Image: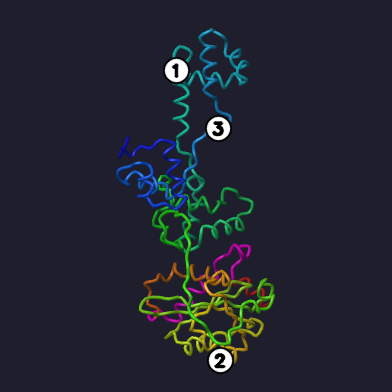
């Protein structure tokens, strides 16, 4: 029978979350569940921040319905609490509490007691952030500084290694942000997340179009092994980030330390790009100038001129292979937190870019054992 009620059975909720994890849209899920409109599905997905709820299960230590029936028969047969406890393999105190909380010996009914126990188990359990004010304050403070939940979790473990109450997993932080019913962290703090999402979405797939050929390219396969395994500093990855009105900036990420440099570009033509990049690269110590890996964008058509000016060899990725510059791709994603696609980079000064780069370089990174890129670079230089 077709129904438009908001209410869902446990089986329907399980199917709803399974379809959501498989990437189906809210309207498609509504149709699959034979709902007239999407209101009910949308309400559940929004309420739980797109995070699938685990199916309810009885605790292993909880009394079962069969045990409650044995208690009811024992009461009817006028057996003592200790006798009933021995028969079902429970302690007398467990049986005594069970009878007392369900109207005593005169009013005890197994079916009603089992239903009430299931309902009582629904009471909300306070999460760690709601119980520990100091932890909640520090998490909110770091979120406001654009730290990711994973960075916050790793930093707390380093700062408070012997205080479990001052530690929390990144997943718990995400849940406190996305799940409205928790009411622990302000919903506005999701605006500080890199993706600015209000809920968890199923993972999708991105494609990238081919951007043309460059003469005399040196393939990434010819890049030294020391660059591949990140053992030696001085090997960089680079790319352009596009803004509004066809404006751009260049991003450079050092593979060993993940140190970031941002370069303002007045134009996108190859002469401007290689000139500005060379100007920044030449400021680096010699031990940090070994190679640069770029995609096959036409802005690096004059790569030989760049190599001549800096003595830094340029290696080019395969077409449509952004994972070959993984550190740079990750950094470009982080930058969108500060510079959305609507940003006109012509209005952003180099000083502002340097300030954002400094903020990124002072954020702890999981891949560095929660050290910051700035600290890692200082280790290399000293």
The mark nearer the N terminus, 3 or 1, is: 3
- Which residue corresponds to mark 3? 59
Q: Give the quadrant of the N terminus.
A: top left
Q: Give the quadrant of the C terminus.
A: bottom right
- Crowd around label 1: few <14 · some 14–19 · many ≥20 (10 Å): few
The mark nearer the N terminus, 2 or 3, is: 3
Q: Nearer the viewer, residue 130 or 284?
A: 284
200 relative to 382 in the view: left or right: left
Tell me the number on the disc at residue 305.
Answer: 2
- Crowd around label 3: few <14 · some 14–19 · many ≥20 (10 Å): few
Q: Position of residue 267 (x, y in %)?
A: 42, 86
Q: Nearer the viewer, residue 46 or 147?
A: 46
Of helix, strand and loop, which one carries label 3?
A: loop
Q: Main secondary structure of the magenta part?
A: helix
CB contact under 8 Å: marks 2 and 3: no
Q: Position of residue 205 (x, y in %)?
A: 48, 62
Residue drawn at point x = 42 percent, y = 51 percent:
24
- Crowd around label 2: few <14 · some 14–19 · many ≥20 (10 Å): some
Tell me the number on the disc at residue 103.
Answer: 1
Q: How many marks?
A: 3
> Label 1 vs label 2: CA separation?
88 Å
Of helix, strand and loop, which one carries label 2?
A: helix
> Label 3 vs label 1: CA separation?
23 Å
Q: Nearer the viewer, residue 307 or 106?
A: 307
Q: Which residues are magenta?
A: 346-373
Residue drawn at point x = 63 percent, y = 16 percent:
86
């Amino acid at each position: 029978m077709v129904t438009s009620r908001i209410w869902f059975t446990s089986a329907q909720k399980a199917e709803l979350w399974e379809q959501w994890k498989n990437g189906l849209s809210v309207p498609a899920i509504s149709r699959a569940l034979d709902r007239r409109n999407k209101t009910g599905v949308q309400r559940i997905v929004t309420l739980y921040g797109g995070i699938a709820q685990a199916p309810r299960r009885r605790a292993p230590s909880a009394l079962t319905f069969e045990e409650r029936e044995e208690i009811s028969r024992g009461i009817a047969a006028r057996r003592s609490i200790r006798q009933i406890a021995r028969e079902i393999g429970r302690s007398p105190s467990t049986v005594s509490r069970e009878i007392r909380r369900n109207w005593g010996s005169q009013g005890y009914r197994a079916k009603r007691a089992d239903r009430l126990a299931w309902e009582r188990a629904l009471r909300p359990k306070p999460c760690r952030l709601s119980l520990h004010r100091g932890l909640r304050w520090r998490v909110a403070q770091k979120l406001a500084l654009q730290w990711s939940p994973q960075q916050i979790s790793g930093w707390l473990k380093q700062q408070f290694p012997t205080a479990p109450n001052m530690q929390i997993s990144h997943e718990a932080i995400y849940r406190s942000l996305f799940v409205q019913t928790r009411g622990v962290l302000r919903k506005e703090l999701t605006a500080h997340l890199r993706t600015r999402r209000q809920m968890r979405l199923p993972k999708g797939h991105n494609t990238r179009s081919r951007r043309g050929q460059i003469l005399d390219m040196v393939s990434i396969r010819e890049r030294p092994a020391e660059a591949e395994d990140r053992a030696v500093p001085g090997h960089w990855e680079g790319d352009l980030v596009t803004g509004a009105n066809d404006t751009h900036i260049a991003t450079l990420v050092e593979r060993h330390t993940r140190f970031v440099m941002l370069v303002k570009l007045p134009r996108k033509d190859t002469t401007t790009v290689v000139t500005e990049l060379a100007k920044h690269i030449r400021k680096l110590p010699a031990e940090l100038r070994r190679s640069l890996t770029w995609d096959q964008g036409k802005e690096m058509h004059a790569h030989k001129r760049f190599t001549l000016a800096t003595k830094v060899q340029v290696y080019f990725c395969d077409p449509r292979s952004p994972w070959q510059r993984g550190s740079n791709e990750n950094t470009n994603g982080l930058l969108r937190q500060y510079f959305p696609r609507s940003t006109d980079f012509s209005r952003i000064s180099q000083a502002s870019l340097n300030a954002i780069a400094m903020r990124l370089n002072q954020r702890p990174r999981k891949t560095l054992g929660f050290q910051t890129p700035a600290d890692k670079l200082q280790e290399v230089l000293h």
